[in-house]
């Protein structure tokens, strides 16, 4: 199993604390979601004249299996002033971003010092940092979105009129609130929704984070162990993760169901075969991606796979390609500054046995080769 300098015995419980106010309000919103959805519709009606002038232009979707670099990509894209994203401060009143911003703007605010996020991966955040919160909306409008016994796939045949009315207006409201001309979202689960999102927004751009299987699985296993222990000690964190739609690891880990391999993944994890389970899951996720790209030419043009290794080793070249794909200026000082900061993680290292390495190679070899590994 991968080693980590932060063993469960040395976890600082404060890292996994959820403020009581956030827990109470988040629970209230989750239990009364239809009311907040209705209020979101009222908010839209009030802002109708302003929203009619806002065009959703080439929205950017960042997705992929967790721990592949999706947060770094969101940090980069979300730091650009023309880009609106969900932020930590937006939770839990996700349904009414304009109203919540009005409330927050009238409250006394102190500058918050950056702190390391719960993942203990060196990424520092503040209430203004971008975060993956639009999953709250997907879960509300698509019942059973995270039921591993049901297909997670949304495609060109998917129809959800209520969501398709609410969601674009929600993006417009975020753009109004943040005085932005573009929208970006990190949503790992959107890997199962690429074709559907492209149907909604034909000019959407997708950045799919990819990582070499062994290093990727090591990071996933490290986070799973960390969150399992943290959630045992802090039950409010488990409830919070469920409310915001993060099931990638922890006590309520749920794989994305993209086909028959999901049952195999669950059976392997249940049997304690963590390495093989993660390897089959990696193959399922990225094999699905490659299949979708081959099947849908328009999606092939909209999707740019971004390899974690390229981000770290060829930062300038990779960010230039990424920027051009998304219609951003690669010479932007913010983008150039990010290129100088990117590097391989130094806070842990994979430590698989020879047998475990063979398992990973055997289960992932075909898909990995197609992705250049």
Image (cartoon, rainbow, N blue to C red):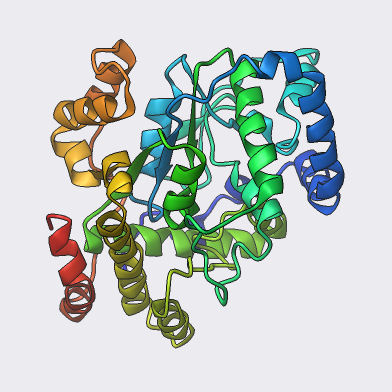
Determine the residue positioned at 48% across, 70% down: 257
Q: Position of residue 55 (x, y in %)?
A: 54, 20
Q: Which one is nearer the viewer's eye here, 313 or 40?
A: 40
Q: Position of residue 102 (x, y in %)?
A: 78, 17
Q: Is residue 347 visible?
A: no
Q: Is residue 198 left or right of residue 12?
A: left
Q: Which one is nearer the viewer's eye here, 225 or 153?
A: 153
Q: How many marks?
A: 0
Q: Is residue 254 left or right of residue 166?
A: left
The image quadrant that residue 313 belongs to is: top left
Determine the residue positioned at 14% across, 28% down: 317
Q: Which one is nearer the viewer's eye here, 235 or 75?
A: 75
Q: Quadrant of the N terminus?
A: bottom left
Determine the residue positioned at 31% across, 78% down: 276
Q: Is residue 179 above or below residue 206?
A: above
Q: Position of residue 142 (x, y in %)?
A: 65, 57
Q: Is residue 87 above or below residue 195?
A: above
Q: Quadrant of the C terminus?
A: bottom left
Determine the residue positioned at 58% across, 32% down: 86
Q: Is residue 343 above or below residue 350?
A: above
Q: Which one is nearer the viewer's eye here, 129 or 192?
A: 192
Q: Is residue 155 visible?
A: yes
Q: Is residue 59 above or below residue 54?
A: below
Q: Is residue 199 left or right of residue 70?
A: right
Q: Position of residue 32 (x, y in %)?
A: 86, 49
The image quadrant that residue 223 belongs to is: bottom left
């Amino acid at each position: 199993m991968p080693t980590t300098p932060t063993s469960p015995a040395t976890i600082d419980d404060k890292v996994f604390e959820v403020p009581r106010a956030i827990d109470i309000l988040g629970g209230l919103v989750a239990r009364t979601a239809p009311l907040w959805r209705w209020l979101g519709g009222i908010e839209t009606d009030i802002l109708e004249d302003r929203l009619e002038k806002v065009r959703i232009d080439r929205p950017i979707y960042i997705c992929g299996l967790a721990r592949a670099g999706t947060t770094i990509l969101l940090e980069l894209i979300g730091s650009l002033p023309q880009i609106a994203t969900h932020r930590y401060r937006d939770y839990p009143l996700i349904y009414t971003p304009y109203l919540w911003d009005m409330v927050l703007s009238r409250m006394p605010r102190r500058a918050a010092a950056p702190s390391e996020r719960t993942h203990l991966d060196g990424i520092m955040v503040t209430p203004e940092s971008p975060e993956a919160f639009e999953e709250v909306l997907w879960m509300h409008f698509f019942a059973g979105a995270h039921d591993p016994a049901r297909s997670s796939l949304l495609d060109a045949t998917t129809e959800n009129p209520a969501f398709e009315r609410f969601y674009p207006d929600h993006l417009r409201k975020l753009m109004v609130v943040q005085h932005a001309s573009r929208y970006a979202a990190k949503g790992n689960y959107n890997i199962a929704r690429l074709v559907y999102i492209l149907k909604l927004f034909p000019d959407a751009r997708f950045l799919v984070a990819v990582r070499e299987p062994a290093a990727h699985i090591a990071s996933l296993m490290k986070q799973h162990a960390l969150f399992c222990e943290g959630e045992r000690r802090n039950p409010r964190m488990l409830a919070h993760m469920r409310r915001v739609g993060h099931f990638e690891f922890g006590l309520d880990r749920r794989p994305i169901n993209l086909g028959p391999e999901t049952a195999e993944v669950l059976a392997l994890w249940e049997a304690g075969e963590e390495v093989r389970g993660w390897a089959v899951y990696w193959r399922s996720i990225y094999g699905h991606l490659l299949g979708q790209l081959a099947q849908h030419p328009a999606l092939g043009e909209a999707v740019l796979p971004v390899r974690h290794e390229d981000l770290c080793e060829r930062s300038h070249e990779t960010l230039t390609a990424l920027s051009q794909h998304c219609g951003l200026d690669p010479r932007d000082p913010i983008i150039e500054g990010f290129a100088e900061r990117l590097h391989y993680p130094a806070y842990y290292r994979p430590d698989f046995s020879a047998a475990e390495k063979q398992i990973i190679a055997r289960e992932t070899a075909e898909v990995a080769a197609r992705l250049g590994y």
